[in-house]
Each structure stands twice: as C-alpha cells, then as structure tokens.
Image: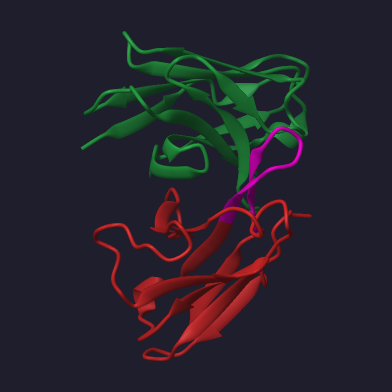
Chain colours: A red, B green
Amino acid sequence: QSVLTQPPSASGTPGQRVTISCSGSSSNIGSNTVNWYQQLPGTAPKVLIYGNNQRPSGVPDRFSGSKSGTSASLAISGLQSEDEADYYCAAWDDSLNGHVVFGGGTKLTVL
Amino acid sequence: QMQLQESGPGLVKPSETLSLTCTVSGGSMSSYYWTWIRQPPGKGLEWIGYIYYTGSTQYNPSLTSRVSMSVDTSSRQFSLNLSPVTAADTAVYYCARGSRPFLMDVWGQGTAVTVSS
C-alpha cells in the first residue's frame, strides 16, 4: 500500500477534462508541496507539475495542479491521445527523519 | 542538457549485493541531490534515497538497513548498493537528479535488475 492514495485508473475521451486525485496526511501533503510525474509507456517518469501547481518549461498548460489540505489534484484539459500514461503524485514526508513518498499511480486511458 | 545513465549487472543472486552506478554528463554535480528510485514489474515507484553532492545521505526508512550510496564528483558518478537482496528487489532502477530533496527533475532511462538464482 502506498502512503499517498490515488485511483488506480481514470479515463476520458479526446477533448475532455479529467482529474486525478491524490490523498495523503498531515506529515506529507499537509505540510509539504506535491509533485506530479508522468510516465509514458516504456519510458522513465518525467516531472509534470512541481510545487503543487508549477509547470516545467515544455509542459503544456493543459496540465494543472492544485492542493488543499491533505489532498492534491492533477487536471488535464483538452485530453489528447498522447496523454495516455501513468501519473504519480509524490511529496516529502516528515516522519521517520524524512523521505519521499509516492502515490500508487493512476493509469489514464484515452478512449 | 544533463543526462544520466545507469549501469550494472542485470542479474543478481539472492542474498548477494546489488550494485549500480549512475554516470552524469552535461553538467555539474554540485548542489544537487542524486537520487535512486525503483519500480517493480507492473507496480509503482518507490523512492530509495538520495546522496547530496557533499556525501550526506537520506534513505527510505524501509530500506535503510540494507542501502548505502556513494558519490564521486570527480568521476561524475554516484552509486547504489543494496544488500542482501531478495526476489522482492527485482525492479527497474532509475537514477535521477534532485533539484530539491523531494523533486527529481532529470531521470536516467532505467536499468532492469532481476534477483534470481
């Protein structure tokens, strides 16, 4: 079981808006920023959102992140076929001297 | 543009030591957190830990008794040792650059390691 909780799957049709949730606790999301990673099939993960809602250069503004309390969300608007991937949330956890915790991942299917 | 490349044996016997090296090119190792992450087949990501360029380390509490990391900035390499290993350590191992302790912003392509006799 992962420390951060994500739905195992999500889906949408091209052009739709989908959201992926990430639930944590006071020791991780509640007190630290959230990062989101996108893992395309057969490739290494890459940073999609950092600092709760910041996009690295090159990431389309169709991707957005938000955080409230001990939960965070990733939203993808104008869904495209190339968005089909696994998405992971992550955050620093202050317990046990500190470490990074990941969500279990959400597989996004574009129908 | 910085690039990272993992190297090491693809097969390790149970109870032995898994040793991987990550070679950094295209930039300085200074001021970064050099991180290892793994992904068991068909499963999610697990943070193993990082070594700062100065040599200080932080490990996943669930692995701390079996993990050690080292860094050699002159050779632009950092390394992971995990011992003893079991089949549960079978995974793709990624090295990554951390611009913060919690943010891995450049990743290697990953290397698959199987633990089996």
Image coordinates of residue A88 in percent, x first then y, are 55, 59
Establish if A81 lies above or below B27: below
Q: Which is nearer the eye, B74 or B5?
A: B74
Q: Is residue B23 visible?
A: yes
Give the image quarter of residue B37: top right
Establish if B85 lies above or below B4: above
Residue at the spot x=33%, y=16% of the render? Answer: B76
Q: Which is nearer the eye, B95 or B116?
A: B95
Give the image quarter of residue B100: top left
Relative placement, left or right, of B4 versus A71 is left
Image coordinates of residue B23 in percent, x first then y, are 36, 22
**Number of disc labels:** 0
The magenta segment: A90-103
Q: Is residue B41 visible?
A: no
Relative placement, left or right, of B41 versus A79 is right
Residue at the spot x=43%, y=57% of the render? Answer: A50
Task: Check residue A95 for magenta coloring.
Answer: yes
Give the image quarter of residue A105: bottom right
Task: Check residue B100 for magenta coloring.
Answer: no
Q: Which is nearer the eye, B116 or A49?
A: A49
Image coordinates of residue B28 in percent, x first then y, are 27, 23
Establish if A107 lies above or below B52: below
Relative placement, left or right, of B33 versus A55 is right
Relative placement, left or right, of B16 versus A39 is right
Image coordinates of residue B102 in percent, x first then y, are 52, 43
Q: Which is nearer the eye, A79 or B35?
A: B35
